[in-house]
Amino acid sequence: MDYDVVVAGGGPVGLMLACELRLGGARVAVLERLTEVDPTIKGGAITTPSAEALYRRGMLPALAEAQRQTMDRFQAFMRERNGGDGGGAAGQGLGFVGHFAGIMLRADLVDRTEPDLRNAGPAAEIAFVAQQDIERLLGGRADELGVDVRRGVELTGFDADDRAVTVRTSHGAIRAGWLVGCDGGRSPVRKLAGFEFPGTEPEVTCHQAVVEMTGSEDLNVGWTATDTGVYAHGPMPGRIVTVEFDGPPADRDAPVTAEDLQARLRRVSGVDVTITGVRTATRFTDHARQATEYRKGRVLLAGDAAHVHSAFGSQGLSLGIGDAMNLGWKLAATIGGRAPEGLLGTYTSERHPVGAWVLDWTRSQVAAMRPDPQSRALREIVSDLAGTVVGTTYLTARLNGGGLRYQLPGEHPLTGRSAPDLELTDGGRLAHHLHGGRALLLDLTDDPELRALAAGYAGRVDTLTAGCPARPELAAVLVRPDGFTAWAADAGAPTSTAGLAEALEKWFGVPEGTVTRG
């Protein structure tokens, strides 16, 4: 084999997956047809689960710096809007935490005591990081980890059998144990492998661009619904979005021109703007589709290759990052011979429901954006709900990835959820002990019996004994490499060592030294 895994697609999802595979010991090549990071404006924010994932791999400082630069651009936009005075206006802009169907969600109405919003630690402060920044950060990390990233190389075909995959590229053939398509919504890997991809047809044409224009002072900042559609202006200089409900574009690949953008923005906004230049522009629709399965033999899918939907709510990038985190350690363990039976099958069973949920949430936003009287009546009701603490908290938590829980064995409330970022008496936090990409048994009551069970998993499961004064009710937590809780026990109740033993074996196989009889 030339590599254990070939990852088709070097965007954030492909790079994240490659990094996770390298942490698990796999030899990885990433094929990316573009020679540089695509400057086209795409996702401008990430949800908390993605921020947690990157934080758990030691990338929080870089994320914070990228967010600072984003906020500097936002403040420049507000200064431009307010004749050089960006202070108060910028502060008002920072008071929003996102939007649902273009209905802005106010930060002061979010109840931060909501359980789905309070356990992420410093990662909860990260949101406004653009897709290009994520890709650059992950590209640097992939280089550090020794991933072979081949830019300017395009997958042209492949042949797969039950032992390997021969990948044909524009620069020759590569033989690998596995192929993962992270190659976008029009994924060649998905099409060539024959994955089913059902879903709903598009009904809107959307444009997103960064432009130079005059006459924009009469455009509203943020999202605005009109009689002819929806548009957005900001939060950076020149950024515009138009949403029109006149069906999908006749030619989605046609060049996006200044004249076309100007006509559409004028039509939707009713403002006589003049676009004098286009820096980046893209066209998209609201078609929503999902592969019925994420694996066919030695070929797997992740990110937009597995599911596509509209960009409303900024959930697509984070959904793909979640796929990569879930798949990476499982595929690496399979390659390394450490995986228990059925481990790789849990990738689809855990991630497919999450993708289906996101597709429905993007569909619901399209329903609340239509300009017909019935949809506008619905929008008024949703707007009223978004003006309450309960409504804003609910929408914010769901759009931000809160409430995600895999259906794992075990009764503890933490089981199947992203592990809380506990502040520990060793001076660190839980996330600081997950940088190496291994599982962690956190012993909070100095229980040698629990640690003895984990001793047979050296190299697969790290152990840490520490206290957590803020959560005295917890006795122990077993955290999977992707940061999700596999097992937990409370103090003051009988600790089930049997439950821990079962969780260890389910996720990490039999302990070293175990004799199996056939």
Image (spheres, rainbow, N blue to C red):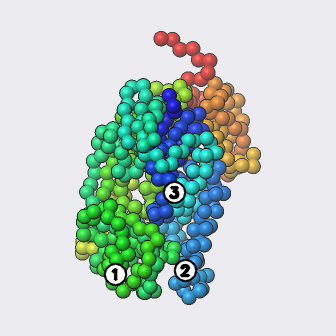
- The x and y percentages for residue 130 are 52, 62
Residue 382 visible in the shown view:
no
Q: Which of the labelled discs sits on residue 322, or is there none?
A: none
Q: Is residue 89 left or right of residue 293?
A: right
What amino acid does circle 2 point to?
Answer: Met
What amino acid does circle 1 point to?
Answer: Arg
Q: Residue furthest front?
A: 171
Q: Quadrant of residue 454?
A: top right
- Is the Cβ of the residue at disc 3 closer than 8 Å to that at disc 1? no
Which sits earlier in the primary sequence, circle 2 or circle 1? 2
Residue in the image at 30% along x and 57% along y: 287
In this view, the mark in front (2 or 1): 1
Tag 3 secondary structure = loop
- Is the Cβ of the residue at disc 2 closer than 8 Å to that at disc 1? no
- The x and y percentages for residue 358 are 39, 54
Q: Is residue 211 above or below residue 359?
A: below
Determine which residue is flagged by label 3.
Answer: 37
Residue in the image at 26% along x and 54% along y: 200
Tag 2 secondary structure = helix
Give the distance between the C-alpha atoms of the residues marked 3 and 1, in whole angstroms: 31 Å
Which sits earlier in the primary sequence, circle 3 or circle 1? 3
Residue 426 visible in the shown view:
yes
Determine which residue is flagged by label 2.
Answer: 78
Give the distance between the C-alpha atoms of the residues marked 2 and 3, in whole angstroms: 28 Å
Q: Nearer the viewer, residue 104 or 169?
A: 169
Q: Is residue 173 left or right of residue 19?
A: left
What amino acid does circle 3 point to?
Answer: Val
Disc count in the image?
3
Tag 1 secondary structure = helix
Residue in the image at 58% along x and 70% along y: 71
Q: Which of the labelled discs sits on residue 266, or is there none?
A: 1
